[in-house]
Every structure is written in C-alpha cells, then in structure tokens.
Image: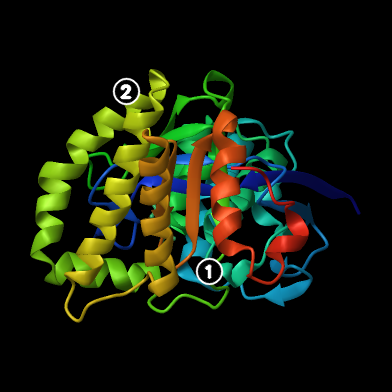
Amino acid sequence: MSIHIASTTAPVNIATLKYWGKRDADLNLPTNSSISVTLSQDDLRTLTSVATSESFNKDTLWINGKEESLDSKRTQDCLKDLRSLREEMEVNDKSLPRFSQWKLHIVSENNFPTAAGLASSAAGFAALVVAIAKLYQLPQSMSELSKIARKGSGSACRSLFGGYVAWEMGQLANGEDSMAVPVASMDEWPEMKAAILVVSDVKKDTPSTQGMQLTVHTSDLFKERINNVVPRRFEEMKTAIRNKNFKEFAELTMKDSNSFHATCLDSYPPIFYMNDTSKKIIRLIHSINEFFGEVIVAYTFDAGPNAVLYYLEKDEAKIFAFIYTLLKKVEGWANKYTEPEL
Ligand code: PMV
C-alpha cells in the first residue's frame, strides 16, 4: 500500500474593491470585478496537507484537529473538478496511478481564529485546491485553478496569488472567464502593510451569500454601484497599484468599503456589519489623515465589524503612536506596544 502526500499554504486576502453580489449563486459568478491584497504567509494563512491511497475508504477532512463534513455542495464541486482534471491525465497516460478514483484525507490548520470573520474560507478553499492540484500534479495555471477555488468561496480565487490580485468577473454564463489574475507582485510595492483591528471575534450575523442575495434583490443603490461605480474604480485601482500611488489607492479603498456597506444598509431589511466601534475607527482614520495633512492610512471592512488598515511601512510608527494614545486603556494593547512620542 502506498500513500501519496502534498502540502501547501494559502494566505488570507482582504478586498480593497469589494465583491458583493452573485449573478450565478451555483457557480459563484460575481456581479462585479474585485481587487484584493494577499497578506503575508507569515501572518494569516491556512496550511493544508492532502493524502491519497487506494486503501482509504472515504474522503475525510480535519480542520484545526476536528473532523468536519465534506458534504457541502461547494466542497464537492471543488473535489469533482479536481478529480476530473486528474482523470483526463490518467486517460492520456495509462502509467499514472489512478488517484482520481481514490479517496482523500485532508488536514487543514489555520494560524488564526476561524470564526473571527477574517476571511478564513478564502484561505481554506485556496489551500484545498492548490494542495490537491499539487498531489495530482495538474498542469493548469493558477488562474485556471482559481476558477475551481471560486466555486468553493468566491473570494478564495484571489488567495491563489500573492500580492495585488484582481478577480475578473467575466461575461460567460459557464464561468470559464471568471478568474483571478495578478495585478502586481508584493515585490513591486513591498512597502504596503496591513494591520487588523479585531473589534469582535463573534461569528458574523448574516452569512455573505445570504447577505449578497438580499442586496442584489432589494437594493437600488446596488445597481448604481455595479453599473457605474465599480467598473471605473476597478481600472483606477489597478492603475494606482501599478503606479504605487498610495493616496489614490487608499481613497478608493475607503470609498469602496463605504459604498459596499451603504448597499448593505440599503438592503431590505437592512444588513449591519459594522458596529459602533467600527464607526469610531472610521472617524479615527480620517482624523489621523487630517492631522498629518495627507492620506497615510486607509480602512476597509468586510462582512463583519473588524477593520483592516492599509498603510506604508514608513508611516507605521506615527499611525500607531496616534492609535496607541487612544487605545492604551484597552486591555492587552499596553503590553504589546510601548508608548511612542507623537
Ligand atoms: O467569498 P465570500 O462569499 O466569503 O464573500 C466575500 C465578501 C467580502 O469579503 C465582503 C468581499 C470580498 O471581496 O472579499
């Protein structure tokens, strides 16, 4: 009996131009293109190892040491696509072991709390797809594989690349042109840093798929967003990244986060992802930019109250000095940072 194993890690990505809305919920086809920054592997990532053997009798998944179901349609769609690509190879080369017919054991581990609303599904599905593709020695490109990860969780397609990534919505009904493509590598703009302010680690209120469908069907503002706002921002943000124009990148990021949350509020009944603390963070970031007389930090919020800040490394000390003076009474904060001079 032989066991074949492969491992990979996939980092979390945080959208700076948000994906919100599905035109096909089955295939996870979006109503708009989106852009994200993939965080460093050293920070938030999923590590996934997969094994296959003729002797395994069922597909099994463990996440953070606990056995989890593989029954969801999303996961099954990913496994089916990967197995059929492997099967094509086996048909063309009869000497290959018949992995496509064997069961899989999948072990996945996050180095951050799964329920903290920090896009764990994106890293999770990206790592699952890449680990199995590695095990099967599939020749497909990362963009091709991103279409499979997309079926698991839309935003997962962007976690197949590091750095600055675009998810092109595509036009085709079968989703063959809805995939992730790199905009720039992290080496091209390495000064960019991200910080996450965890406001709450409770699981989000309205799951993203449910929230998106509600917005698509009830918000008038949403129509304006997808038809007139996002297509323009998609081009502007890619240009800002390629030109390393932080001010432009930061303003687009903040405006797009606000626009996405406005469409949530415009849904009926309304969806609230940000809480009072999130709103205070928004005010704080605008105050910091005003204080320094230039845009040096941007906020963005996903489907939850936690803030992700983007800034350039050179500005880190002054941004956190400012935040420190306001947050020093919060438990845990004071231990981490020594009070810097403003
Ligand atoms: O991929 P999902 O279904 O988890 O949706 C992600 C939605 C947002 O995080 C709010 C935006 C995005 O582009 O990641």
Question: What numbered label is drawn on residue 239?
Answer: 2
Q: Position of residue 211 (x, y in %)?
A: 30, 71
What residue would you read off at disc 1?
199
Identity of the amino acid at label 1? Answer: Val
Identity of the amino acid at label 2? Answer: Thr
Horizontal side, residue 139 vs residue 131: left or right: left
Disc 2 to disc 1: CB gap under 8 Å: no
Residue at x 18%, y 34% (from the top left corner): 232
Q: Label 1 crowding class (10 Å Cα cut-off): few <14, some 14-19, many 20+?
A: some
Q: Is mark 1 within 8 Å of ligand 1?
A: no
**For residue 210, which quarter of the picture?**
bottom left
Q: Secondary structure at mark 1?
A: loop
Q: Position of residue 113 (x, y in %)?
A: 66, 67
Nearest to the observer: residue 154 or residue 319: 319
Residue at x 58%, y 44% (from the top left corner): 87
**Figure quadrant of the N terminus:** bottom right
**Figure quadrant of the C terminus:** top right
Q: Is residue 15 visible?
A: yes
Residue at x 20%, y 63% (from the top left corner): 263
Q: Given the current orientation, which residue lies at the most extreme front position? A: 341
Of mark 2 and mark 1, the one earlier in the sequence is: 1
Q: Position of residue 106 (x, y in %)?
A: 72, 60
Nearest to the observer: residue 309 or residue 85: 309
Nearest to the observer: residue 82 or residue 309: 309
Residue at x 40%, y 20% (from the top left corner): 242
Q: Nearer the viewer, mark 2 or mark 1?
A: 1
Q: Is residue 34 visible?
A: no
Q: Label 2 crowding class (10 Å Cα cut-off): few <14, some 14-19, many 20+?
A: some
Q: Secondary structure at mark 2?
A: helix
Label 2 and label 1: CA atoms lie apart by 32 Å
